[in-house]
Image: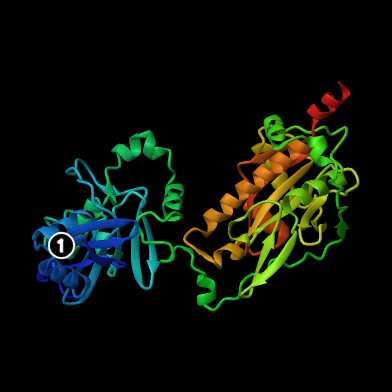
């Protein structure tokens, strides 16, 4: 293998992908949503833009146009040698000035390395660039905090490992382990996976809607069939639920304002007078039933009492019943298409008991809920259409469902409370569903309200 000291790293600058240009008012406008930059409209600018958009130019040319584009984050840099491309720095936004390194530098706790098409992709929600590395040994040398790249003749400042380390530092991938990321609340309050999810599930600086993000219908383009609206049925005994008569609800329950004002989260239930099967059925009917299904271009869309992104309605409800008059205990699946319950597991099953324990702890009461509604998502219904934001849509839809359940519980005089945690592993073990196809995403406890009995008796 050729030694690095014999290699001169070539640097080529190119205009970042997805840039459109137009001339108006004597100016050349470059656009790469949500970015826009205006340049003088003359033949030198046009030639420069054409060159940067095509073969590129050697890095270091310091004419005003290049300097402006470089400073504002419009240029990608490709580092190569006689063996080919070593790594590429894809700018996402203008770089902020980076103070000189003080102390030991290591890979930031927010940096993520993943493999794609034989290369390593290095990204971070705090970085100004994304780096694609085609030679893994370069990354190993560049992120080694003990490596002295200025002293090792195999990695001289002109070498590729030193160049990569310089780019990692300039883009924000390297940090002092004892610096602000370790000390300041604004960093410590974000777990790495949470900050990355927040960053990557929003458009940000990576392109525009339709460019690998949003409702691109990528599943159809890739040749996959869409998931049907109804999930595969369970084979356990079925319980038909009565369709509630809602004709008098508008008068007896009051306005939406009144319902919202008296709503509160209730974690304790009245076990002397538990929730009834008709009350549970009404709650499910009013919040989660399928009113109708219609098909467009081979995709089944759903109408339901609550809104859901894209009208695909990926969420499923699984009542875990411990005390409910007129209904045996057990883990059920709510068939929203036919308004019935399918028995999945007895409540004695170890995974079902674990879900109940997690709910008891999550409610902070330690009490076993009369009914635990496990919210699951058939993610393919959403992710077949949406790129980059599918799981974020699922979680937002879960919040909408929580709101519908909480408001309806308040209107019906039931004790309801959304929980901030769930046991996805226990759900998989109890249902046997493939977690990549259907997974637990939330829990909501519901039962009879001690407060309601006191109000009625008073």
The quadrant of the image that shows the N terminus is bottom left
Label 1: how many residues lie within 10 Å, few (<14), some (14-19) or many (20+)? Answer: many
Q: Is 392 situated left or right of 319 in this image?
A: left
Residue 363 shown left or right of residue 92 in the figure:
right
Looking at the picture, how far across and down is residue 231, in whole percent?
Answer: 71, 65
- Location of residue 129 (image quadrant): bottom left
355, 240: nearer the viewer: 240
In this figure, which residue is indicated by the disc labeled 1? Answer: 155
Query: Is residue 10 in view from this perspective?
Result: no
Foreground residue among 418 and 180:
418
Tell me what residue is drawn at x 68 percent, y 54 percent: 427
Is residue 317 at least partly visible in the picture?
Answer: yes
Horizontal and vertical percent position of residue 429: 69, 58
Check the image and name the residue furthest to the bottom: 223
| Quadrant of the image occupied by residue 237 | bottom right
Question: Which residue lies at the image location 77% right of the left edge and 62% below the top edge?
Answer: 337
Is 289 placed above or below 105 here? below
**Outermost residue, top direction?**
458
Q: Position of residue 214 (x, y in %)?
A: 48, 62
149 lies above or below 282? below
SS of the residue under disc 1: helix
Q: Residue at the right extreme?
A: 326
What residue do we see at 10% from left, 68% from top?
A: 44
Frontmost residue, 428 versus 411? 411
Left or right of 296: which side holds 145?
Answer: left
Residue 11: x and y, percent? 15, 67
Residue 438 position by quadrant:
bottom right
Left of 260 or right of it: where is 220?
left
């Amino acid at each position: 293998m050729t030694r690095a000291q014999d290699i001169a790293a070539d640097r080529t600058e190119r205009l970042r992908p997805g840039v459109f240009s137009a001339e108006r008012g004597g100016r050349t406008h470059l656009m790469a949503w949500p970015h826009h930059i205006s340049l003088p409209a003359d033949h030198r600018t046009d030639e420069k833009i054409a060159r940067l958009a095509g073969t590129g130019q050697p890095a270091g040319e310091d004419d005003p146009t290049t300097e402006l584009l470089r400073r504002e984050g419009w240029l990608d840099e490709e580092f190569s040698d006689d063996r080919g491309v070593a790594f590429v720095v894809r700018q996402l936004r203008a770089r902020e000035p980076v103070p000189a390194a003080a102390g030991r530098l290591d890979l930031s706790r927010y940096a993520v390395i993943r493999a794609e098409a034989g290369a390593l992709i290095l990204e971070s929600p705090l970085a100004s660039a994304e780096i694609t590395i085609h030679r893994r040994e370069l990354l190993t040398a560049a992120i080694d905090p003990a490596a002295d790249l200025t002293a090792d003749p195999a990695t001289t400042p002109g070498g590729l490992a030193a160049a990569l380390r310089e780019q990692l530092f300039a883009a924000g991938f390297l940090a002092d382990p004892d610096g602000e990321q370790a000390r300041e609340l604004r960093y410590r309050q974000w777990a790495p996976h949470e900050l990355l999810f927040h960053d990557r599930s929003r458009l940000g600086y990576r392109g525009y809607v339709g460019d690998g993000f949003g409702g691109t219908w990528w599943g159809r383009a890739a040749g996959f069939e869409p998931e049907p609206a109804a999930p595969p049925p369970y084979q356990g005994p079925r319980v038909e639920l009565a369709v509630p008569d809602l004709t008098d609800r508008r008068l007896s329950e009051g306005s939406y304002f009144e319902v919202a004002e008296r709503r509160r989260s209730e974690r304790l239930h009245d076990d002397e007078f538990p929730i009834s099967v008709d009350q549970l059925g009404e709650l499910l009917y009013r919040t989660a039933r399928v009113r109708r299904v219609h098909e467009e271009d081979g995709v089944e869309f759903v109408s339901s009492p609550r809104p859901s992104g894209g009208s695909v309605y990926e969420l499923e409800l699984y009542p875990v019943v411990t005390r409910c008059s007129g209904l045996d205990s057990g883990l059920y699946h709510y068939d929203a298409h036919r308004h019935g319950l399918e028995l999945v597991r007895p409540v004695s099953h170890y995974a079902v008991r674990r879900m109940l324990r997690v709910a008891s702890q999550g409610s902070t009461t330690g009490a076993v809920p009369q009914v635990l509604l496990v919210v699951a998502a058939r993610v393919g219904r959403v992710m077949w259409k949406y790129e980059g934001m599918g799981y974020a849509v699922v979680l937002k839809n879960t919040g909408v469902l929580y709101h519908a359940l909480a408001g309806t519980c308040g209107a019906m005089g039931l004790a309801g409370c959304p929980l901030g945690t769930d046991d996805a592993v226990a759900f998989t073990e109890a249902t046997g569903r493939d977690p990549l196809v259907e997974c637990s995403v939330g829990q909501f406890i519901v039962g009879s309200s001690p407060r309601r009995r006191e109000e009625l008796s008073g």
